[in-house]
Amino acid sequence: MAPSLNETLRALPAVEAVLNTTELLPFAQRLPHSVVADAARNAVAHVRQEILAGNTPETSAESIARLAAASLAYASKPNLRPVVNATGVVIHTNIGRSILAEEAVKAVVDVAENYSTLEYSTQDMARGSRHSHCEELLCALTGAEAAIAVNNNAAAVMMVLAEFARGREAVISRGELIEIGGSFRIPDIMDYSNAHMREVGTTNKTHLSDYERAITPETALLLKVHTSNYRLIGFTESVSIKELKKLADQNNAQSENQILVYEDLGSGVLLNAYPFDAEAEPTVAHSVKEGADLVSFSGDKLLGGPQAGIIVGSKKHIDRLKKNPLARALRLDKMTLAALEATLRLYLDPERALERIPTLRMLHMSAENARAEAQALAEAIGKAVPASCGTLEVIDETARAGGGSLPMHDIPSAAVRLTFAQGNAQGCETFLIQECDAPILARIKKEALLFDARTLKRNQHEYIASSLARYFETL
Ligand SMILES: *Cc1c(COP(=O)(O)O)cnc(C)c1O
């Protein structure tokens, strides 16, 4: 006769018995007793619930200990941890946008492990300014007179509007009232900074005369926003910074009220190089040269550095920003400053920047090189995964810049396509994300899994191969 429910429940091992298994021994050695005991107790309770729900779980002390061990292993894994990016999207906002150059990583570690010259000037042997570390580099790279870096570009926009347009008017084209990544909408930022938005023109066309008519004694600035993540094509017209500057100058010559021209560029392109030139992603230097009084951009988009918002422009305006209370609230920490300085330093030699800054290297990589990388990945997978599991091919694919940059630009790339003879693409995708220490993000296309080689590092090929082998072993 089968045992009754009560008998089954009574036969469950005691928490003590679960704790004494070899499964939990390694955890008992490195974690506090209470933590391991809680895990064992929860595992017993879980099995009890299963039985009460009419299921027939394994009830040996060892199998319950394995449940506890799994939950302990899961709990001890950091939440924020590395991801392997096989998506072909270079600046992927969900997984941290840009990865840093080795030089930048080293700079971060150096200032994290040691006291630093964060706000100390060795020249004056006295207190210095944290704004000084990147300013000269930014000026050299953009042609601007002065610069300041804050937490991110959203913060930069907010600070410029708050300092120069609070309680006054900022004129902006209706074609540039954009939303970027959900929480950043130009009209909302304006509202929050107490700048009154004066919309001009239409969605597709805005003329210089539209700005001209909007100017009043209340006008504080003419704002131009780079429509980073979308492009208006067809019957369109917008006004260049050069024309806006001319308009502002004409006004400023005749009026007490001095109007500023400010461009929010979004992606900070510092180099004239493929693929930026192909898609007319304007450089910061270009915007400065055209006459923008202030230009702001992100540190971790096309620039390829840490999260930051950089503002460059004329000294008298940047000086005002440095004194704004938001400059203190939104300031960068030493680790970000170190990463930013080291990244900018690489730009002094453009060839070196293209080689050493991962975002630039990945965007710049030729289709042939991407194909060679994909070939190497296919070989690594072929060695680890038996041929009976599925088919491997190297195919042409299209990679993307991402991060709202170069939205119209398809980057010819190459990927490994895995078609499944055992298991399936969905199951494998879930395994690679949920069962691997560093989740592997790939793409599913027509029942196959695609690994774009462009966004991978060579030393990740083995890891992908062994993780796939583990997936097929679980089937
Ligand atoms: C990305 C972007 C922002 C926001 O920058 P964050 O660095 O993400 O805060 C603002 N404006 C434009 C035009 C952008 O492209």
Image (cartoon, grey):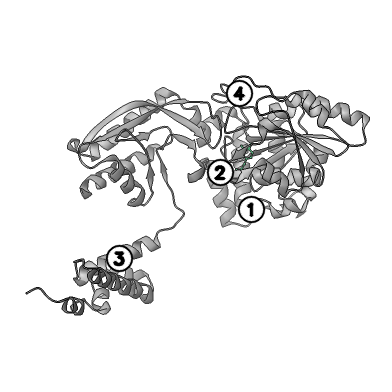
Q: Check disc 2 and report its element: helix, strand or loop.
A: helix
How far apart in space, not on screen, are marks 3 and 1 (Cα)? 38 Å
Residue at the (23%, 42%) spot, across then down: 423
Report if the beta carbon of the residue with label 2 is closer than 8 angstroms to ligand 1: no
Vertical relation: 260 (above or below) 320: above
Q: Position of residue 410 (x, y in %)?
A: 48, 25
- Inspect the image, locate mark 2, and give the three-letter code of the amino acid beneath it: Ala
For this view, does 272 lie left or right of residue 53?
right
Q: Which mark is residue 104?
A: 2
Vertical relation: 32 (above or below) 395: below
- Inspect the image, locate mark 1, and give the three-letter code of the amino acid beneath it: Asp
Q: Which residue extends farthest top? A: 235
Question: Which sits earlier in the primary sequence, circle 2 or circle 4?
Answer: 2
Tag nearer the camera, 4 or 3? 4
- Inspect the image, locate mark 3, and give the three-letter code of the amino acid beneath it: Ala
Towards the viewer: 466 or 475? 475
Residue at which label 1 appears: 333
How far apart in space, not on screen, are marks 1 and 4 (Cα)? 33 Å
Q: Position of residue 41 (x, y in %)?
A: 31, 75
Q: Position of residue 419 (x, y in %)?
A: 26, 34
Residue at the (35%, 65%) spot, across then down: 72
- Inspect the image, locate mark 4, and give the three-letter code of the amino acid beneath it: Ala
Image quadrant in which the N terminus is located: bottom left
Q: Check disc 3 and report its element: helix, strand or loop.
A: helix
Question: Which sits earlier in the primary sequence, circle 2 or circle 1?
Answer: 2
Q: Check disc 1 and report its element: helix, strand or loop.
A: loop
For this view, does 457 lie left or right of residue 260?
left
Q: Please identify the quarter of the rendering in which residue 52 is found.
A: bottom left
The quarter of the picture showing ligand 1: top right
State if disc 1 and disc 3 touch (CB < 8 Å): no
Residue at which label 3 appears: 69
